[in-house]
Image (spheres, rainbow, N blue to C red):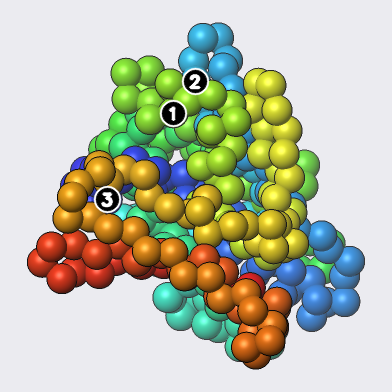
Amino acid sequence: MGTKLYGDTGVALRELIQNSIDACLLRKALEDKWVNDYKPFIELKYYQDNNEPILEVNDNGIGMDQYIIDTYYSTVGSSFYKSSDFYSLRSETGADFVPISRFGIGLLSCFMIADTILVDTRKVYGPHKSSNPISLIIEGQDSIFWVKDGVREIPGTQTKLILRKKENPWQDLSDDNFIKLVEEAVPNPPFSIQIKTLSQTRKRDEHSFKELIASSLKDYSWNKHENLKEIEILFDDISEGYKHDLCLMPLYFLIYANSCVRFFILWH
């Protein structure tokens, strides 16, 4: 069912990260109102465990309790961030927060690449107060949920995808190329995201976007063709009025024979 909705297996990676970013940003908005010190953090790991490929995302965000799991997380198409529960929470706390993810649909996308999902979570309730930890095992695209008491000590959520060996979209990638995929999925994160593979550890944060160059965003899936042209235009002449922090870095137009133009802009 996930493939029917998405088509692109890379969506699962992006959805997991976006869900964690939202969870952390919401908790930060709440902790700021409670005048508590809080530093958001996400760790993404890609590794082997007992010869099984694992994709793991761990965050210290707001987390989930049984009500959130029953009402939103386990219900396809039901978004917490579009619910009266969310708007009531934002109104009561005065939290300034706008979500980016599709809570619930993102879980469905995971079944494009995995048959089993393991979740450990614990929800923030208030200043220094949280729910009891919960552990979930989600089996198959029919989404059979096994719920039991968890052991997580701090609020947040850890999600493990046991990837299908025959349908693991990253099985032929080097560790370096996998990290690049993650970096492309979140080119400008609002806080630190740590990426770990068997051989490398890399951090991406709110300053990483300044290191991007436009050529790194090009889509190399297009084959060379006589009707496919690439034009590079550089906007980097200060004498013409372009300042470094307000300039268009290399701008690429891909022009087709039918006059369709595809382009992207990297803006600093």
Q: Does label 2 or label 1 sit earlier along the sequence? A: 2
Please determine whether, in this image, residue 181 is positioned above or below residue 97. Answer: above
Q: Are marks 3 and 2 in contact (CB under 8 Å)?
A: no
- Give coordinates of residue 210: x percent, y percent: 69, 63
The image quarter containing residue 247 is bottom right
Residue at 56 percent across and 17 percent down: it is 48
- Give coordinates of residue 217: x percent, y percent: 48, 54
Local secondary structure at mark 1: loop
Which numbered tag is attached to residue 111? none
Which numbered tag is attached to residue 53? 2
Q: Return the residue nearer the eye: 44 or 63.
A: 44
The image quarter containing residue 89 is bottom right
Q: Does residue 35 appear anywhere in the picture?
A: yes
- Give coordinates of residue 184: x percent, y percent: 52, 50
Tell which tag, 1 or 3, sits nearer the viewer: 1
Please determine whether, in this image, residue 153 is positioned above or below residue 258. Answer: above
Residue at 42 percent across and 75 percent down: it is 82
Identify the image quadrant of the N terminus: top left
- Marks 2 and 1, how far apart at CA: 10 Å
Q: Does label 3 or label 2 sit earlier along the sequence? A: 3
From the image, tell me which residue sits under label 3.
Answer: 6
Q: Does residue 60 appear anywhere in the picture?
A: no
Please determine whether, in this image, residue 176 is positioned above or below residue 181. Answer: above
